[in-house]
Image (tube, helix red, strand yellow):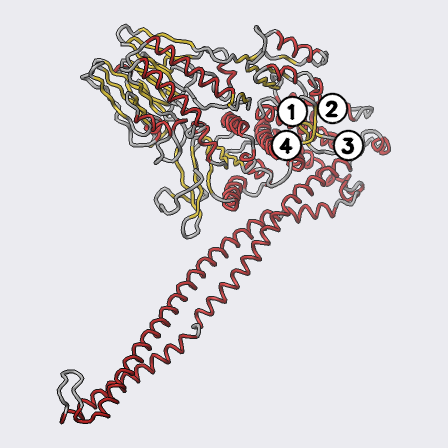
């Protein structure tokens, strides 16, 4: 009994504004990753396919995203006609208006597909001796508390849910700490819990997994740059979990370049070096380069350096970071720095540095309070 | 998301000045004036009468990048120690040297400017008062309008009723008169109008009955005629209400104009404050020439010049810090296409792109700049110990480009560690794009009686508790 666990497909995701043949390139990347995953699922031929939320990138997905999902489901149906596909809606699939079921609900009508968008649904497959409980996003943020229980008559009990797992999250109610969670479960009751929402793959507790997204679709893809994306399968009999990577567009986050105040001209050189050192080049990749401590008045050092690289990469993000903080405390640093500047300004006035520090400290808000 | 079911009056309707939980809240719905009302309510509650805190909490108001920039610099410098410099200088002047050496602003004729700033500082309060007066007038207008409508309906209904009665009586009188004529012409041989038999000796009594009825109908009909004539004229209380409505509308119009006029003058305050601050700085002794002219070795004179130098340093420091932080935020908002910000020689803010620095041009650039500046000020104020427990972000957000909006919401989430409650006026599209980044959604609307209300619901992602 093998189950395939996918999540966070984000079909319809768009970013960076690059368009090819009228379609956002990142949107096409995400659809491609989904179809790769479907092909791989077909090869594995699991008994059931689970999709744990955020099927679409937004509750009103573009038509192309609906087509991509329909094609994927059709491919599965043709290749694996007896394999049910069970989807629980995530936040991105759920419109704000509580009466609106969202676009995903349309797929609930397809044979062999369960697309749950509003309330928790329990499905029993006697042929597989499998019971699956689908908990969509709306069930976990709106009361009443969903009834989530394993079926004691089924050999396999699987839960598909969407949300964040936060064991520390408690609210103080009448002097007692109470969990905000509407859904509470004991992992021992389930053979597998398939979760969606987090884009990083991880095992939350024994048998409780986030499969992670198929592509790097977070607002800051750099955080996911080093993370392999894909989906996972689990053989319920042996308990063996396997990750199946999907190769999406490379995202490269380069090491920060510190600005050297004593050698400012070195900056242009370093930017070129760092960008040229990327294995395989930066062509068609999503790249971030960081420069640390470049003062606003020296931005001119970058004049004309970047356009060539911006053209070569799919997206080149140039991020300017602050200098790492120093060792001195802010107060001491500020008052002494200001006093030094006063000495410079009042040059030749026979200044007493300590008196100026005292004066500055008298004026600083910390002393005032 | 933009449409709100205003008919559904329920327990979930809350007053506008609602207390929210921590996190990022989206405020959706409501027109411009309702948004302004909410902004002012929050700013007033949180900042009381401190205009700098109001700027921190609710933003600088409808000002352009240059004015917003100068104001942010001045506020940050004040929180960094400029206030202390002012106090030290005041103490110095009161301590004795001031008598021989009057304050700088009286020298340079800045007195008028200072008075103007003082006068303009009363503007926000005047605007608030006027806005409240306008709200009261509008409520009165709605009430009197309702009363007038009811009175008009009553009057028309009564007139119609009188007319109907009059017509009925006329018909009946006409009918009876015809019958009387027939009886009088036919005499005792006339057939009874009810049983068709010859009346003979009952002729007189029947004639009397019909004549009596005719007279009664004519009498009643006359009453209804007078009543109808009376109701043809508009009743005095309806006329009073009409007059009252007209006068109220004129007052509302006048008050609306006054509110708009006061609102339009608000930017003048920032400008005047800014000019005053600049003049005070510029009015201090120059670094070389004047200080040499003074040739004073007295401690107080030296202290005064040190304070002036410190004022310059603090302003310069605030400028540098804001330039760097605003640049970082703008860099992030624009996915790195804007590298930073600067200030041109004439004090106009600039943005730095690959090809170098240039002035801010498009509406999107203005919005992104103002948004980044807001965040930078909140951030740097917190570094200086000035913490806002809540902030509101207004219409600049909706003018950002779609990608920048997503990044802006991401930035706001990171800012929650410094400001526990952030309220963002926005349209529903951003909620659809990133529902999990918002903790609360507040829908603003106006009910059928014209009263504004808020409806709060949870957003965000559900929490799963696993044992």
Read off the residue under disc 3: B305
Question: Separation of disc 3 and disc 2 at Cα?
Answer: 13 Å
Q: In this rendering, does residue A42 appear at all? A: yes
Tag nearer the camera, 2 or 4: 4
Query: Of helix, strand and loop, which one carries label 3?
Result: helix
Read off the residue under disc 4: B76
Query: Looking at the rendering, which quadrant does residue A126 occupy?
Result: top left
Q: Residues within 10 Å of mark 3 (few under 14, many from 20)?
A: many
Q: Closest to the observer: B84 or A18?
A: A18
Asked if the residues shown at circle 3 and circle 4 are in contact, with their CB atoms under 8 angstroms apart, the answer is no
Asked if the residues shown at circle 3 and circle 2 are in contact, with their CB atoms under 8 angstroms apart, the answer is no
Left or right: B1 in relation to B272: left
Count the labels in the image. Answer: 4
Read off the residue under disc 2: A341
Query: Looking at the rendering, which quadrant does residue A109 occupy?
Result: top left
Q: Position of residue B182 (x, y in %)?
A: 24, 89
Q: Position of residue B337 (x, y in %)?
A: 61, 23
Tag nearer the camera, 1 or 2: 1
């Amino acid at each position: 009994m093998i189950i395939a666990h996918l999540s966070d497909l984000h079909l319809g995701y768009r970013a960076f504004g690059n368009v090819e043949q009228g379609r956002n390139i990142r949107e096409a990347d995400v659809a491609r990753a989904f179809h790769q995953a479907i092909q791989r699922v077909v090869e594995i031929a699991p008994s059931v396919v689970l999709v744990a939320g955020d099927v679409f990138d937004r509750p009103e997905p573009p038509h192309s995203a609906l087509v991509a999902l329909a094609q994927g489901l059709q491919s599965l149906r043709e290749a694996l006609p007896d394999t049910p596909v069970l989807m629980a809606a995530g936040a991105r699939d759920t419109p704000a208006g509580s009466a609106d079921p969202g676009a995903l609900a349309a797929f609930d009508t397809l044979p062999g597909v369960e697309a749950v968008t509003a309330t928790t649904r329990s499905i029993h497959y006697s042929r597989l001796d499998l019971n699956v409980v689908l908990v969509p996003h709306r069930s976990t943020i709106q009361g009443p508390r969903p009834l989530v229980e394993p079926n004691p008559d089924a050999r396999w009990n699987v839960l598909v849910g969407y949300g964040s797992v936060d064991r520390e999250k408690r609210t103080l109610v009448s002097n007692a700490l109470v969990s905000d969670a509407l859904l509470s479960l004991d992992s021992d009751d389930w053979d597998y819990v398939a979760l969606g929402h987090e884009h990083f793959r991880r095992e939350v507790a024994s048998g409780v997994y986030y499969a992670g997204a198929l592509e790097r679709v977070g607002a800051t893809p750099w955080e996911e740059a080093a993370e392999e994306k894909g989906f996972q399968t689990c053989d319920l009999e042996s308990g063996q979990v396997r990750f199946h990577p999907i190769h999406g567009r490379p995202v490269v986050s380069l090491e920060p370049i510190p600005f050297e105040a004593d050698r400012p001209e070195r900056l242009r050189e370093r930017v070129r070096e760092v960008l040229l050192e990327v294995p395989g080049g930066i062509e068609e990749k999503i790249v971030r380069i960081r420069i640390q401590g470049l003062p606003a008045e020296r931005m001119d050092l970058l004049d004309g350096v970047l356009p060539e690289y911006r053209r070569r990469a799919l997206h080149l993000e140039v991020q300017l970071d602050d200098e790492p903080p120093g060792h001195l405390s802010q107060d001491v640093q500020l008052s002494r720095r200001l006093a030094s500047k006063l000495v410079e300004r009042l040059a030749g006035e026979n200044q007493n540095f300590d008196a100026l520090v005292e004066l500055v400290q008298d004026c600083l808000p910390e002393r005032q309070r | 998301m933009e449409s709100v079911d205003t008919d559904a009056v329920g327990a979930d309707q809350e007053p506008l000045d609602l207390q929210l939980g921590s996190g990022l809240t989206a405020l959706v719905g409501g027109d411009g004036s309702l948004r302004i009302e909410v902004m002012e309510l929050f700013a007033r509650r949180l900042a009381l009468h401190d205009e700098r805190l109001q700027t921190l909490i609710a933003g600088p108001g409808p000002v352009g990048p240059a004015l917003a920039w100068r104001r942010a610099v001045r506020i940050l410098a004040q929180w960094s120690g400029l206030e202390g410099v002012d106090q030290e200088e005041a103490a110095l002047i009161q301590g004795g040297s001031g008598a021989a050496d009057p304050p700088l602003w009286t020298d340079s004729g800045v007195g008028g400017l200072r008075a103007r700033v003082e006068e303009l500082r009363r503007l926000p309060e005047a605007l608030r008062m006027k806005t409240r007066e306008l709200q009261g007038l509008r409520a009165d207008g709605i009430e009197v309008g309702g009363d007038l409508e009811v009175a008009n309906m009553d009057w028309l209904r009564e007139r119609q009723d009188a007319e109907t009665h009059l017509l009925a009586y006329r018909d009946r009188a006409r009918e009876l008169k015809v019958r009387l004529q027939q009886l009088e012409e036919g005499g005792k041989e006339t057939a009874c109008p009810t049983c068709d038999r010859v009346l003979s000796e009952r002729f007189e009594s029947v004639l009397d009955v019909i004549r009596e009825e005719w007279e009664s109908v004519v009498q009643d009909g006359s009453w209804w005629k007078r009543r109808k004539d009376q109701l043809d004229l508009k009743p005095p209380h309806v006329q009073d209400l009409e007059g009252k409505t007209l006068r109220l509308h004129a007052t509302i119009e006048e008050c609306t104009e006054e509110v708009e006029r006061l609102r339009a003058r608000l930017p003048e305050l920032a400008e005047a404050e800014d000019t005053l601050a600049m003049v005070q700085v510029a009015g201090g002794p120059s670094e070389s020439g004047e200080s040499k002219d003074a040739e004073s070795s007295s401690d107080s004179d030296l202290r005064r010049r040190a304070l002036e130098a410190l004022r310059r340093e603090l302003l310069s420091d605030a400028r540098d810090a804001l330039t760097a932080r605003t640049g970082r935020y703008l860099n992030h908002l624009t996915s790195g296409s804007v590298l930073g910000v600067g200030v041109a020689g004439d004090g106009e803010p600039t943005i730095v792109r690959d090809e170098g620095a240039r002035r801010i041009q498009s509406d999107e650039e203005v919005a992104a700049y103002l948004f980044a500046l807001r965040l930078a000020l909140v951030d740097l104020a917190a570094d200086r110990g000035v913490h806002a427990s809540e902030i509101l972000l207004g219409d600049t957000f909706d003018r950002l480009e779609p990608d920048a909006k997503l990044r802006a919401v991401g930035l706001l989430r990171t800012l929650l560690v410094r400001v526990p409650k952030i309220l963002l006026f926005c349209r529903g599209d951003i909620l659809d794009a990133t529902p999990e980044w918002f903790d609360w959604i507040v829908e603003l609307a106006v009910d059928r009686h014209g009263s504004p209300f808020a409806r709060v619901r949870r957003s965000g992602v559900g929490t799963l508790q696993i044992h």
